[in-house]
Image: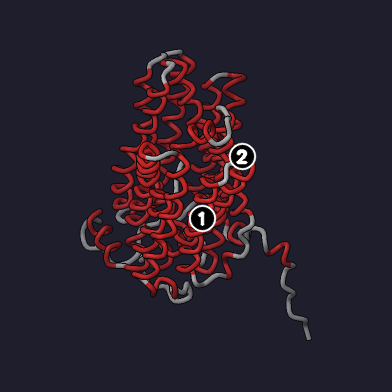
Amino acid sequence: MPSAPQEAPWYRRAFADLSPLREHPDYRRVWSGQAVSSVGQQMTAVAVSVQVYDLTGSAFATGLVGLFSLVPLVAFGLYGGAVADTVDRRKLGLIGSAGLAAVSALLAAQAMAGLGMVAVLYAAVAVQAGFFALSSPARSAMIPRLVPAHQLPAANALNTVSMNLGLTVGPMLGGVLIGAFGAQSAYLVDTVAFTGTLYAMWRLPAMRPQGDRKGRASVLDGLRFLREQPNLRTSFLADLAAMIFGMPRALFPAIAVTFYAGDARTVGLLVSAPAVGALIGALFSGWVGRIHRQGIAILAAVSAWGLAIAAFGALHNLWLGLLLLAVAGCADTVSMIFRNTMMQVAAPDEMRGRLQGIFIVVVAGGPRLGDFESGAVAALTNPATSVITGGLACVACVLLLAARRPAFLTYDARHPTP
């Protein structure tokens, strides 16, 4: 009589579950392409900032890069979600990736030609953000068609790995290349990096939305659907609470000076610490597939984020502060994995594009609102008070959501209800 298969040892089960990559070639190609292109896009982001600053010598002009990307992200995120629920998502992903590659090629051309025109860089950033927002909902809505439902937490954890690899490796590689060969080298690498995503999209089968569709997909229909689905709505509100009240990013320069008597290098450490924690959380995410009560997992993760941020504001030791920011980043990864999984499983396929579009708007706009909130409170009080009260307000919002929506705490991924 054959013996039952032995479960893998705990130390192997602690690492990210690679079964979606092993068992599903289409997902493996899409993931690999996105991982490489994510690194390239972060290299381009660094190169644009360096070019703008070199041309203007102005921190304000460099900061405008974010504004020129925010508006298309919000506008085209909503529109791209509606389009993704109407057309073949594979084709939309191809168009978006090809457009992003073309913009990177144009950026390389202007750098090699030495145009020295800031307006060209702003325009390129805006077009780039538009292509990303147009195609990103389609790419995210594909994932439930590439892997089975029980592997979605693992797939979303792997997606988080690729995203945070880009956030950590991309800027470092970009800085090295720009310093050695100029901004055009980063743009050229980014252009080549998109071939992996284009190939992955080309190999996919047609990905038309499933379900009954009557007429054109409407952005308002997506917003109405979200309003009427309490579990999905609560997951969005929990994320907004974390980003608005528990995101002291705008205060990092002041914190580096007032907390630690540091300089620009200290700011760099503070900025990178959450991304490092998020990457570690994703790499050690083998346990997420065994969690079925995903609602309570989301609220617990957002609470952990808020408590870590509050402690960061209260304790003014640099290394302890970096550790707390890394813990916050790890908690954010856990929340993101379960929020994405809930959205992909509980929502019908014909609504996934619009929900992903709304998600882009939340992710793009939430941190900007958080910058305003933390800056305003710091102006009225001081940076420490702003950080501490923001973290505690995040936890208070979680407790309020739990009290207003107790069914969210019992949400079971085995019986998903939006």
- Residue 234 vs 359, above or below: the answer is below
Q: Secondary structure at mark 2?
A: helix
Image quarter of the N terminus: bottom right
Residue at (25, 56) in percent of width and height: 217
Tell me the quarter of the picture where residue 216 sits.
bottom left
- Residue 80 vs 176, above or below: the answer is below
Closer to us: 252 or 111: 252
Closer to us: 57 or 7: 57
Q: Position of residue 227 (x, y in %)?
A: 27, 63
Residue at (44, 59) in percent of width and height: 395
Q: Amino acid at mark 1?
A: Leu
Disc 1 target residue = 307
Q: Amino acid at mark 2?
A: Leu
Can see residue 144? yes
Disc 2 target residue = 318
Which of the two labelled residues, at mark 1 and mark 2, occupies the earlier sequence position?
A: 1
